[in-house]
C-alpha cells in the first residue's frame, strides 16, 4: 500500500484540491455534500494522472531505475504494469462515484466534463501522441486543474 501512496505523489494533490476550494469560495450557496463530492473526484483524478504517468513512462522506457528525482514505482519494479493499470482504473472508478452523484442532481454535463477529464488524465502520458511529450502538458494542467476544476466547482452548485 505504501508504494501506491508514493506513486500517488501526495505533494501534487493540491492540484486537485485548490481549484475546488477556489470555486467553492466563489459561490454564494455552500452545499457541503457537493463540495465533498467535487473534492473527492478532483483528487481521485489527480491520483489517476499520477498513476498513469508512472505507468506510461515506465512501459515506454521514459523512466528507468536510473531516473533522477522522485522514484517511479513501476520503472523501479516495485509494482507490475498490470498492478498499475488496475490502480489507474480504481482511481478513475473512485472519481466516478461522486461524479455520478453530482450528475444525478445537476445533469449530464457533469458526465461530459468527467469523461473529458479522464481522457486528459490518460492522454497526458499515454496514447499515440502524449500531449505531455509534445509541449502541451502545462496547457492541459492549466485547463483541467485550473479552469475546469474552478469553474466546475462554481457551475456544479
Image (tube, helix red, strand yellow):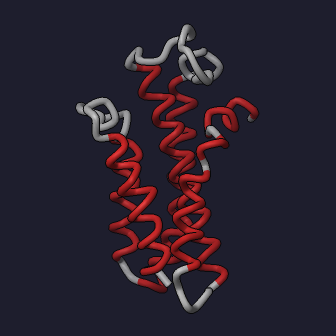
| 80 and 147: which is toward the camera | 147
Q: Is residue 95 above or below residue 88?
A: below
Residue 88 locus on image (x, y percent): 52, 41
Q: Which residue sits furthest bottom?
A: 29
Tell me which residue sits at (61%, 87%) in the image.
30
Q: Nearer the viewer, residue 10 or 83?
A: 10
In the image: residue 92, left or right of residue 120: right
> In this image, 144 relative to 72: left or right?
left
Q: For residue 35, what is the image quadrant?
A: bottom right
Which residue sits at x=54%, y=17%? 75
Q: Is residue 136 left or right of residue 107?
A: left
Measuring 75% from the left and 33% from the top, which residue is drawn there?
Answer: 2
Q: Position of residue 65 (x, y in %)?
A: 57, 10
In the picture, the quarter occupied by the N terminus is top right
How many marks are shown on the rendered structure?
A: 0
Residue 117 point in image, percent of width and height: 39, 56
Q: Residue at x 45, y 56 (%)?
A: 145
As drawn, 129 above or below 143: above
Give 4 or 50, whichever is nearer the viewer: 50
Looking at the rendering, which quadrant does residue 106 occupy? Answer: bottom left
Amino acid at each position: 500500500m505504501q508504494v501506491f501512496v508514493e506513486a500517488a505523489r501526495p505533494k501534487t494533490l493540491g492540484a486537485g484540491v485548490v481549484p475546488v476550494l477556489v470555486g467553492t469560495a466563489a459561490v454564494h450557496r455552500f452545499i457541503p455534500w457537493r463540495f465533498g463530492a467535487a473534492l473527492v473526484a478532483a483528487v481521485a483524478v489527480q491520483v489517476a494522472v499520477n498513476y498513469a504517468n508512472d505507468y506510461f513512462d515506465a512501459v515506454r522506457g521514459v523512466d528507468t531505475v536510473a531516473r533522477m528525482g522522485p522514484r517511479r514505482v513501476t520503472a523501479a519494479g516495485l509494482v507490475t504494469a498490470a498492478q498499475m493499470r488496475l490502480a489507474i482504473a480504481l482511481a478513475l472508478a473512485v472519481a466516478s462515484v461522486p461524479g455520478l452523484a453530482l450528475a444525478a442532481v445537476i445533469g449530464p454535463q457533469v458526465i461530459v466534463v468527467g469523461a473529458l477529464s479522464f481522457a486528459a488524465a490518460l492522454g497526458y502520458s499515454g496514447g499515440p501522441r502524449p500531449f505531455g511529450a509534445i509541449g502541451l502538458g502545462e496547457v492541459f494542467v492549466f485547463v483541467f486543474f485550473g479552469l475546469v476544476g474552478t469553474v466546475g466547482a462554481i457551475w456544479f452548485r
